[in-house]
Image (cartoon, helix red, strand yellow):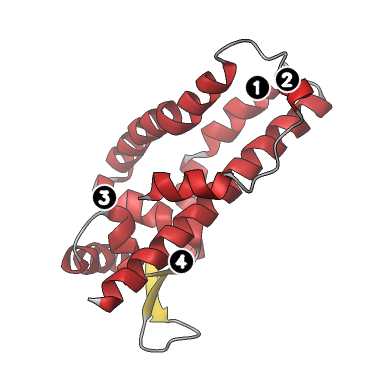
């Protein structure tokens, strides 16, 4: 479902004129899609597993925490959707994260009936510090590129993230509306 909506959404993304892309080596765009679509996901999953082990928390808890940190305030039902677990499973997971001090529950600002999960900044800083090695690795790799090249890479990745975030939110809202109808 998400992939279909992503494809539809991407039709609205501004693309470079053909003259700029025609000189790309054959397969380069396929390689980029593979890197962004599968390879980063695979290696991020491996990093998440190692970090969860280091922190002594279940991998599912770390994944949930990173989702909450990314979205800042996530309704319980949407966290369950993103994790692919039942609402009962999400409640148990949130209970563990809350007991450890990583998240807190609160009411949704627009719909007071809905519970949202928010990260506890002080506790989550530790997680960000554990990921500091990524920033250091990026800084080392960045030495190979000039400012213009880095600005181009940053703009490209930022647009990819914005598009993925938008498509994810649309998917979550569509799923929520679909489940509310049943």
Indicate the position of residue 35 as horizontal and vertical percent values: 48, 25
Residue 150 drawn above or below residue 116: above
CB under 8 Å between callouts 1 and 2?
yes
User: In the figure, is residue 65 to the left or right of 121?
Assistant: left
Which part of the image, by quadrant, shows the C terminus? bottom left
Indicate the position of residue 107 as horizontal and vertical percent values: 41, 84
- Sequence-first tag of 3 and 2: 3
Q: Mark 4 — residue?
A: 120
Indicate the position of residue 99 as horizontal and vertical percent values: 28, 68
Residue 140: mark: 1
User: In the figure, is residue 58 to the left or right of 166?
Assistant: left
> Would you identify the image quadrant in which residue 114 lies?
bottom left
Q: How far apart are marks 1 and 2 (CA)?
A: 6 Å
Give the secondary structure at mark 1: helix
Q: Mark 2 — residue?
A: 143
Q: Distance between the residues labelled 4 and 3?
A: 18 Å
Q: Can residue 101 be seen in this view?
A: no
Categorize mark 4 by other alpha carbons within 10 Å: few (<14), some (14-19), many (20+): some
Q: How far apart are marks 3 and 1 (CA)?
A: 31 Å
Q: Mark 3 — residue?
A: 60
Residue, x 82% and y 28% (percent of image)? 148
Give the secondary structure at mark 3: helix
Q: Which of 116 and 21 is in front in this view?
A: 21
Q: Distance between the residues labelled 1 and 4?
A: 31 Å
């Amino acid at each position: 479902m998400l992939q279909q909506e992503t494809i539809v959404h991407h039709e609205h993304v501004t693309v470079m004129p053909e003259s700029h892309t025609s000189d790309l080596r054959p397969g380069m765009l396929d390689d980029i899609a593979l890197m962004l679509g599968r390879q980063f996901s695979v290696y991020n999953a491996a990093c998440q597993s190692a970090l969860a082990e280091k922190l002594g928390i279940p991998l599912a808890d770390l994944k949930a925490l990173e989702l909450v940190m990314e979205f800042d305030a996530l309704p319980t039902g949407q966290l369950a959707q993103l994790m692919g677990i039942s609402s009962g499973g999400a409640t148990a997971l949130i209970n563990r994260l809350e007991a450890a001090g990583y998240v807190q529950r609160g009411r949704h600002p627009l719909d007071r009936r809905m519970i949202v999960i928010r990260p506890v900044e002080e506790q989550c800083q530790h997680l960000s510090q554990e990921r500091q090695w990524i920033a250091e690795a990026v800084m080392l790799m960045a030495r190979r590129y000039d400012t213009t090249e880095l600005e181009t890479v940053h703009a490209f990745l930022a647009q990819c993230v914005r598009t993925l975030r938008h498509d994810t939110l649309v998917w979550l809202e569509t799923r929520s509306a679909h489940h509310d109808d049943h």
